[in-house]
Image (cartoon, coloured by chain):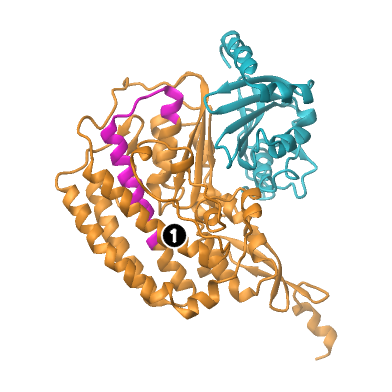
Chain colours: A cyan, B orange
Amino acid sequence: MSEPSEQNKQHTADSETDPRVDALRASFPQAILDAAKKGKQLVLKVSGGALVPLCRQLRDDAAFRFDYLADLTAVDAADGLRAVYRLYSITSGDYAQILVPLDESNPRIASVSSVWPGAIWQEREAFDMFGIVFEGHPDLRRILLPEDWIGHPLRKSAEGKEPKE
Amino acid sequence: MSAADLSQFDYERDGNQIVLNMGPQHPSTHGVLRLLLTLEGEVMKDVSPDIGYLHRASEWIGQHRNYAQVTPYMSRLDYVAASAQEFAYVEAVERLAGIEVPRRAQYARVILAELTRIASHLLWWATFGNDLGATTVFLYGFRERERVLDLIELMVGARLTHHSYRIGGVAYDVPVGFRERVLDFLEYLRPKLGEYDALLTGNKILIERAQGVGVLPPDQAVAWATSGPVVRGSGVAMDIRRSDPYSAYPDFDFDVVTHDGCDVLSRYLVRMGEIRQSMRIIEQAIKRLPSGPFMAKLPKVFRAPAGDAYGRVETPRGDFSVYVVGDGSGVPVRVRLRSPCFANLQALPVMAHGQKIGDLVAILGSIDIVLGSVDR
């Protein structure tokens, strides 16, 4: 993130060699902001709009087959709040990382629980810790912290507090 | 007393369904887990786990301590398989910082990780037997686990929270005479496993209680992101030691144990098979232990570069991943802990749906959760 010029160079070189990424860019021209290959891992920077159809294609397309949601979380760093998904393909052993930049004042993103049901609890945890609202989630409430906890402790701005009596 | 007076004692009821609370203080939930059961007669219509009772803000601590200080917290997540979590964390940091770990340290790490797996599976076998009412099994399992803990104590000086993995290597060299002690132990354990099989594995009562109970079809096992013996007990050969090998694992021969019954019995058989595979790995590692340093040369003040990295490790309970984000300073920006127990427990309602309430403890036992790892 700190050296965008060098990363971009690498991105263009890699996306030329990977026809799967070109096909994906053609299907979602607006959604994919950036694509790169980092070792065995495909790194996609995506805008939130077309996340669910993109994820469904990554799962079902024979070229990808990312059938396993290995991890779903968020990072609140100096360069902004982002959701981070890590996908794994049991068939090919490949990884993909999806980064979705979010609005810090009102973080909202579509839920991928319809694609991978395993996301249900992970999205609840991201909501609990970061206050990200997952639209279309079947049961979005706190999971690890008490129900009456105030705030979201892993946000930069957080002052996690227990509720006063 | 008229019927109306009794209504204050009535339980929550909806038609023929009742909602029953199990835990958080229940001996078979292995810690502080609360389950809300929706029952129709004896049949479970829904199971809703309520977690978070053991939450200790480990991810928050991760971004408020320097890189080396985070390591001991990893031991305290899944406290019966401490080294497995440390393994994932140091792997992630070493990948982020591009540190080359000496071969001897890698072998020592694998030996400790596999000893941990044996200890963890023995503990699971003991408590699983106990859950089903087989108290002898409980005593036998703990007896052999004690031997493993003695070996681990000899190696790192601690029995449960090891804290022996360091960024760049291990804290202590493999001690003098360790090879003989390990080989003696493997000789000791081998016939014991035969005893276990004679005592419990072929036991008709176990088979009646475990076969066809708590079924998790392979497609569901993958969709719910389960891992470890749960996913391999559904016939999916996902083992990170094989599919995405880390550390010294490519050097060793072992089989990925799978059973395709998708039930409690299959998960049981996977774990019993894995104890034998871990013994194979340890034997190869201790016989071929390379000489040389056990710690990489690192600067006194450790700073990881800006960027991110994953450490993904096959713990006794499955896929434990650590996602580390650095910004060039000595303190991580983010330490994300992906717990296998958290994901596996999420699939409990799938396994328990439509089963009898009496089978719940067997199904929960077969997932092998540790609440310290679920709640982090």
Q: What residue do we see at 66% from left, 61% from top?
A: B349
Amino acid type shown at disc 1: Arg
Q: How many marks?
A: 1
Residue at point 63% right, 19% down?
A79
Instruction: Answer with left or right where residue A27 lies relative to residue A9.
Output: right
Q: Is residue B328 visible?
A: yes
Residue B11, given in percent of the width and then of the height, sits at 74, 75
| Magenta segment includes B107 | yes
Picture quadrant where residue A119 is located: top right
Whether B67 is among the magenta residues is no
**Magenta: predominant secondary structure element?**
helix
Q: Quadrant of the N terminus of chain A?
A: top right
Provide the residue span drawn in magenta.
Answer: B93-122
Asked which secondary structure carries label 1, the reply is: helix
Query: Against B366, is B131 above or below?
Result: below
- Determine whether, in the image, residue A102 is placed left or right of residue B321: right
Q: In the image, residue B245 lies at what x, y percent?
A: 43, 38
Report the side of B261 relative to A22 (left or right): left
Question: Could one spot residue B66 in this view of the protein?
Answer: no
Image location of residue B260, percent across then percent down: 55, 60
Q: Residue at x 68, y 38 (%)?
A: A151
**Toward the viewer: A52 or B270?**
B270
Location of residue B257 in the rendering, given as x and y in whole percent from the top left corner: 45, 55
Q: Residues within 10 Å of mark 1 (few under 14, many from 20)?
A: many
Q: Which residue is mark 1?
A: B271
| Residue occupying the point 44% across, 36% down | B89
Left or right, B173 with reference to B359: left
Q: Nearest the camera: A46 or B290?
A: B290
Most extreme residue toward the left, as rendered? B177
